[in-house]
Image (cartoon, rainbow, N blue to C red):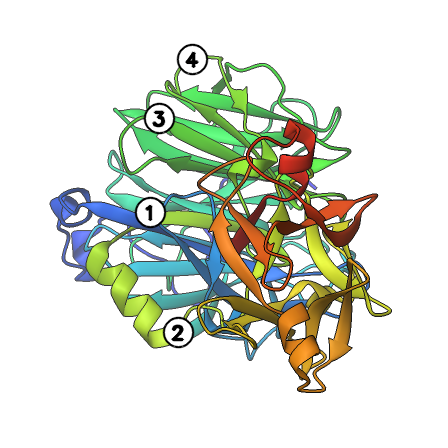
Amino acid sequence: MALTRRAFTLGAIATAGLTASGLAINPQAASAATYTAYLKTYFTESPDHSASNYGLHLAVSRDGLNWSPLNQNNPVATPTAGERGLRDPYIFRKQDGTFVVVATDLYGIDFSRSSQYLHVYDSTDLTSFTGYRRIRMHTYTNVHTWAPTVFWDAGRGQYAIVYSANTTADLFLVNYTSDFRTVSAPQTYFSPGFPILDADIKVDGGVTYMFYKNMSNGNLYGARSNTGAPNSFTTYTSGLRQGGAIEGAHLVKRNDGSGWWLWGDSFVPVNNDFYLWGTSNIGANSWSVLNQRDYTPPLNSKHGSIVGITEAEYNGVVNRWGLPSWVRLKSSNFPDYYVRHANHEIRIDPYPFDPHRDQMWRMVPGLADSAGVSFESVNVPGSFLRHSGYVARLDPNDNSATFRADATFYRTAGLADGSWSSFRSYNFPTYYLRHAGYVLRIDPLSSSSSAADRQDATFRVTS
């Protein structure tokens, strides 16, 4: 279906002038702030969909790499109109320093369903999401409106909302807005002659950068424009890919000013739901793959976005929504594997898996010594990780002295990496918790043990 540029009415169309809308503009408000942390938006899915939730989820990170879900990984807002679910939530800091979230109007994985709308929320400081509404982006039949991204077009004095659509081909459309309530007519924004999906767009140093998926070969690419105008982009990077299938590119400028990260979301649940590259120069065709040891996405998270936040915003959002009451243990030498229980056995398995709560633990004061720690299962409360015959098991606490001792460990600096953790047995003080053949047990270890053995006994305590 051909897309033509014509008068377009969605009930009310925004005028071209931003100030005419009455919106106060302070271009310096956001740029003047010092960002000390990051906030991520996402929805959740797991392999059997027992943990799938199509509401707005939030996570925070100090380093931009390792993430803590907020609100116990429950949604902070859920759409009540349209498909009554969202995917691909994109958060953007507006010119006045407040936030807007736009998201795909779709519940679940029936991608044959097409909506003409996007969900929209406003937020002043991330402690609440208000003004829920849907905005109609086009009037095409059987054309989807997926994976929106937002940027400030300084030349136009308006915000651009770019999204994936399938009119004459799989391409990107753009609508301009001053208030995220009324939008201009849709225009073709980028259509390079092959099918594309999932744009993320950032403006830096007067250059507009766009990363996207080439559906013909499954790789992610970067394009750039000196204006950010429709049909003005030139692809300048080689294809990037990790894993079996990748999409959902999202681009993050580091708070420390040292470069950029590019996240890619796996299309199907494989060993890890996200992959990551880094560069010191976004304008160069030079991206390095980050080791999965270096980053931990939020539990069951899927396609979203990341924004830098201030210390006050970080404290406010944590105080409002709360950090997780549970931890996960990530293997050092199998960094896409997490400690979980299965039929009372304690082992490491590649994430994601279901039941996903098998990997969630409450790390509590040691049952035999409060200076140590014990691990209580989240989904089998009252049962703890303990060793028996040197093999780790999940058993109910019988409150015996033997059980309490078997279930108590001292957390130490990681034997293979001091910034990670190892866990020394309370009642076998030269023995450490480690995996062997993917099963957890305790074995005698020290700093002089082999590198492989020390890796087996080293874990990241994460959420």
> Type of residue at label 2?
Trp
Q: Residues within 10 Å of mark 3 (few under 14, many from 20)?
A: some
Disc 2 marks which residue? 321
Residue carrying label 3: 259
Q: What residue type is labelled 1?
A: Tyr
Closer to the chain start, of discs 4 and 1, is: 1
Q: Label 4 vs label 1: CA separation?
A: 26 Å
- Pointer 2 and pointer 1: residues touching (CB < 8 Å)? no
In-front residue for pair 428/285: 428
Q: What residue type is labelled 3?
A: Gly
Q: Do the residues labelled 4 and 3 touch (CB within 8 Å)?
A: no
Tell me whether the residue at label 3 lies in contact with that at label 1, contact meaning CB atoms closer than 8 angstroms.
no
Q: Distance between the residues labelled 3 and 1?
A: 25 Å
Can you identify the residue that label 1 sits on? 159
Residue 53, by quadrant, is bottom right
> Could you tell me if residue 49 is visible in this image?
no
